[in-house]
């Protein structure tokens, strides 16, 4: 019945429809032309795009004033905030040969207090709170009987509750082993590093008890070759805060950073002078800090300052107040020789600073009461106030816009480039559309006068080039006649649109 | 013989364009076979449809003309149907009832689109910069079904009830619930949004439906008819859902929403179109209701008028016919149809009785059918004979 309905009847019906509706058969593809106009890309470049997006805020005015007040760098203190892994292993073996010896339920084979010494730590820690970390444990028994293991860590507490590992292993048979593995999460755990005596450093108090469980009526048969092995790995320990004596750690301050990408800023000079530029080092750590800035270089050119090469000592922060009272040291960047901002105006590719930082230059003056909160390390802040009265000479800025590949079969038309800006100076722009696999396209060039509404350029483009996608590299050229007041909110805007005709085809 | 002509004329009239293939009431016991097909639109010309289906260039002038016709209602419609039916009518039984059996097959498609959607597809958006193109409401429905019906009628065949077993072999139902497309005059801003859903079901479904007719009067009569009143439970299929919106002056490089980076990422399209398998469900048959009235004058003249609702037609359809039978063997009719998927157009019919049976042919819009500028064509042929 289904065949009858689904084939014979349907074919009759569809055959009639075709005969009536088409009066013939399909002879060629169906085609029509549609005119399309679509915006593709809207790219805007302002001061933050040209010079970086951490400029701070610009106040309105003529000229506008760029203000930045904030943290620009933190001193890394991995020695204090990242603890190396520590492995503790206990192996219990009978002190006899032969066997078996019967061990009744409830028997204690080992009950031992231990101080676990954390390895690889040069500092003398007395207490810390962990941001994260864990104990990875592995317990192995080769005993023909139930084994109960209880590992107490009274020095390690989470929410005031000591961490405990309590494991019961079933009997191992035929010379095999019973193994249990797992992890104990130590996130937010507090660790007392003074050991069982309360006067030590870098060690925690623990108690290991191994025996047979009293609540399981099973008599273990112990041979001289049996063993119980316990491994505890403290791993991934990251510090939230820490106390103790941190030692006289020396930290190299050999840092460098990229400033102006020569590919993006191939030439030109900018003249702008801040009214205020102070760099401040803040010591938020409960430990004394000393540092030396040996050298500062912009693109290889040395910048000098009266404070350079001199030891600066910052006293420890007082964490008994809220907020903590921190010592700070301030450097007036306008006192640099040659002028730091004139050197920056030449668009240097990089900046490099060389120096050293030392903890506790005076030694353990507090008898082991240094303190660090990991989220508040020593840091460097910048206080900059720059009136945007800027002179520009021969500045060239390169940008590149991506035109994504799109399938538009049969398209013939133009890539429309519209440029607008509201800078108080004239820009010139040149560029081209480079379709992938087609190579550079014809170049265009235009001048954008002050106050011009829009500059429109049309580049021929077809379906093949659109299918490949491409890039539209442009160069923006800027010159000013001396210093010009800018508001800081000026932008250059480039919009790409596609206009043309597409031939739709149904095969 | 006169009664036979009246019955034949009624068969001929109701088998006209746009209607389901009709059974031909014919007594004493008889058999009839009817086949029909049509396409009808209020905006799309025969030339456009032919070029679209057979191939070739869709001329801009033709497309502009279609759009011009869509301007005032703001939308256009197209209906396509084809089918055939084999009917048998038994002898009058003791209670005056006539057993009826029909085996039929039919496919029907109905589509309606807005001027905005049509122009966006066939003209592009450039001619309408600065204007919002409405993409909704738009709907496409398609159903192909087969029907085996059993029923009882009166001796004259003017009143009957048929219960049909339906097999829906294939169907689709899609709609754009809301949607708009806008590009600013300066081609520097684009806004598009669309909510759409399209269901296909490819596995056969089964259902039940009723055909009912009751007539009051003989010389001057009127009748109520209900056709294909029922549902089918269709099989599994696929659903495509689009629900997206974009307002942009061009895609920015990165960030939330649509970006140059985002559209190049694998799987971006899946966020715009969701495809999923759907299980079984119910689908209403394209039921129709007809109010029909007719009269017979002297010397073989008669007249009839009918109003039809439903059947996926966007508007009710009005048929008016005048019939004349100069002899027992020949009959002709002339009328007009308005509404449904199309505009006002004429309809002509011819009936001829031979020794092998009676033939009735109805030609919908005979002038437009042969013209590229016509808005559709349709015909039905009914053959019937006594057993």
Image (spheres, coloured by chain):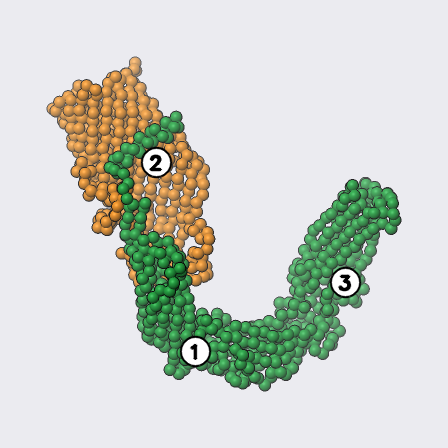
Chain colours: A green, B orange
For residue B387, say whether it is visible.
yes
Q: Is residue B62 above or below residue A381?
A: above
Q: Which chain's residue wears label 1?
A: A
Give the CA distance from mark 3 to mark 1. 61 Å
Labels 1, 2: one chain: no
In this view, which residue lies farthest toward the top?
B94
Q: Position of residue A74 (x, y in %)?
A: 60, 71
- For residue A117, the mark is 3
Quarter of image, res A268: bottom left
Q: Which chain's residue wears label 2?
A: B
Q: Is residue B269 above or below residue A155?
A: above
For residue A485, say whether it is visible.
no
Front residue of this view, candidates B158 and B100:
B100
Q: Is residue B212 left or right of residue A266?
A: left
Give the CA distance from mark 2 to mark 3. 81 Å
Give the CA distance from mark 1 to mark 2. 71 Å
- For residue A268, the mark is 1
Neighbour class for label 1 at 10 Å: few (<14), some, many (≥20)? some
Name the mark nearer the viewer: 3 or 1.
1
Front residue of this view, candidates A261 and B307:
A261
Labels 3, 1: one chain: yes
Does dot 3 land on a helix, a strand or a loop?
A: strand
Name the mark nearer the viewer: 1 or 2.
1
Q: Is residue B18 above or below residue B60?
A: above
Q: Is residue A157 left or right of residue A339?
A: right
The residue to which callout 2 is attached is: B143
């Amino acid at each position: 019945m289904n065949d009858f309905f689904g084939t014979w009847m349907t074919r009759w019906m569809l055959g009639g429809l075709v005969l009536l509706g088409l009066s013939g058969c399909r002879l060629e593809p169906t085609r029509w032309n549609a005119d399309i106009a679509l915006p593709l890309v809207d790219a805007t470049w302002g001061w933050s795009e040209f010079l970086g997006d951490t400029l701070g805020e610009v106040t309105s005015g003529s000229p506008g004033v760029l203000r930045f007040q904030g943290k620009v760098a933190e001193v890394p203190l991995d020695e204090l905030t990242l603890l190396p892994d520590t492995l503790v292993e206990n192996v219990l073996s009978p002190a006899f040969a032969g066997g078996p010896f019967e061990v009744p339920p409830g028997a204690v084979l080992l009950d031992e207090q231990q101080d676990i010494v954390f390895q690889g730590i040069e500092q003398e820690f007395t207490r810390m709170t962990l941001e994260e970390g864990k104990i990875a444990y592995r317990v192995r028994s080769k005993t023909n009987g139930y084994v109960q293991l209880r590992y107490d860590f009274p020095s390690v507490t989470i929410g005031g509750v000591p961490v405990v590992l309590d494991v019961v292993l079933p009997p191992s048979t035929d010379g095999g082993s019973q193994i249990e593995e797992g992890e104990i999460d130590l996130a937010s755990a507090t660790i007392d590093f003074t050991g069982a005596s309360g006067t030590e450093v870098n060690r925690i108090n623990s108690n290991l008890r191994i025996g047979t469980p009293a609540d399981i009526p099973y008599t273990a048969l112990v041979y001289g070759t049996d063993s119980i092995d316990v491994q505890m790995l403290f791993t991934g320990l990251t510090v939230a805060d820490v106390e103790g004596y941190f030692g006289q750690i020396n930290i190299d301050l050999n840092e460098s950073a990229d400033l102006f990408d020569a590919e993006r800023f191939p030439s030109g000079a900018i003249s702008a002078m801040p009214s205020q530029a102070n760099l401040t080092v803040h010591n938020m750590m409960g430990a004394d800090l000393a540092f030396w800035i040996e050298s500062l270089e912009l693109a290889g050119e040395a910048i000098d300052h009266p404070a350079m090469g001199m030891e600066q000592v910052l006293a420890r922060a007082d964490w008994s107040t809220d907020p903590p009272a921190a010592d700070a040291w301030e450097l007036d960047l306008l006192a640099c020789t040659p002028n730091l901002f004139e050197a920056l105006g030449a668009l240097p590719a990089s900046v490099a600073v060389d120096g050293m930082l030392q903890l506790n230059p005076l030694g353990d003056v507090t008898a082991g009461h240094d303190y660090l909160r990991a989220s508040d390390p020593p840091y460097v802040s910048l206080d900059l106030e720059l009136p945007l009265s800027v002179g520009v000479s021969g500045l060239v800025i390169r940008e590149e816009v991506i035109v994504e590949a799109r399938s538009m079969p049969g398209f013939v038309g133009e890539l429309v480039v519209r440029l607008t800006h509201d800078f108080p100076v004239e820009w010139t722009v040149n560029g081209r559309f480079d379709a992938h696999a087609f190579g550079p396209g014809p170049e265009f060039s235009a001048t954008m006068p002050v106050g011009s509404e829009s500059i429109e350029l049309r580049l021929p483009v077809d379906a093949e080039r659109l299918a490949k996608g491409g890039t539209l590299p442009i160069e923006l050229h800027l010159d000013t006649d001396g210093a010009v007041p800018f508001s800081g909110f000026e932008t250059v805007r480039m919009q790409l649109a596609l206009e043309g005709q597409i031939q739709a085809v149904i095969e | 013989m006169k009664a036979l002509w009246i019955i034949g004329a009624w068969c001929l009239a109701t088998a006209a364009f746009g209607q389901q293939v009709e059974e031909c009431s014919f007594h004493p016991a008889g058999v009839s076979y009817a086949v029909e097909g049509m396409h009808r639109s209020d905006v799309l010309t025969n030339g456009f449809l032919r070029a679209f289906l057979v191939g070739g260039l869709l001329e801009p002038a033709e497309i502009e003309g279609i759009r011009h016709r869509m301007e005032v209602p703001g939308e256009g419609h197209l209906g396509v149907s084809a089918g055939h039916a084999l009917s048998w009518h038994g002898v009058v039984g003791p209670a005056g009832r006539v057993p009826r059996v029909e085996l039929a097959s039919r496919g029907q498609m109905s589509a309606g689109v807005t001027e905005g959607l049509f122009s966006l597809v066939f003209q592009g958006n450039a001619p309408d910069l600065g204007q919002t193109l409405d993409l909704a409401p738009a709907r496409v429905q398609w159903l192909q079904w087969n029907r085996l019906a059993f029923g009882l009628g009166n001796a004259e065949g003017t009143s009957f009830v048929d219960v049909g077993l339906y097999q829906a072999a294939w169907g689709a139902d899609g709609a754009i619930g809301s949607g708009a497309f806008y590009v600013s005059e300066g081609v520097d801003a684009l806004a598009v949004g669309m909510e759409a859903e399209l269901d296909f079901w490819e596995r056969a479904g089964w259902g039940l439906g009723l055909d009912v007719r009751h007539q009051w009067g003989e010389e001057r009569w009127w009748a109520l008819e209900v056709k294909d009143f029922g549902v089918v439970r269709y099989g599994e299929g696929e659903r495509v859902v689009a629900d997206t919106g974009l307002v942009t002056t061009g895609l920015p490089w990165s960030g939330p929403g649509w970006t140059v980076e985002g559209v190049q990422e694998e799987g971006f399209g899946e966020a715009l179109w969701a495809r999923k398998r759907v299980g079984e469900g119910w689908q209403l048959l394209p039921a129709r209701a007809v109010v029909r009235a007719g009269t017979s004058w002297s010397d073989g003249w008669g007249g009839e008028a009918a109003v039809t609702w439903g059947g996926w037609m966007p508007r009710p359809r009005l048929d008016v016919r005048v019939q004349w039978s100069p002899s027992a063997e020949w009959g002709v009719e002339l009328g007009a149809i308005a509404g449904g998927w199309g505009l006002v157009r004429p309809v002509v019919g011819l009936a001829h009785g031979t020794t092998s049976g009676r033939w009735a042919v109805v030609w919908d819009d005979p002038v437009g059918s042969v013209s590229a500028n016509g808005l559709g064509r349709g015909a039905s042929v009914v053959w019937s004979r006594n057993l």
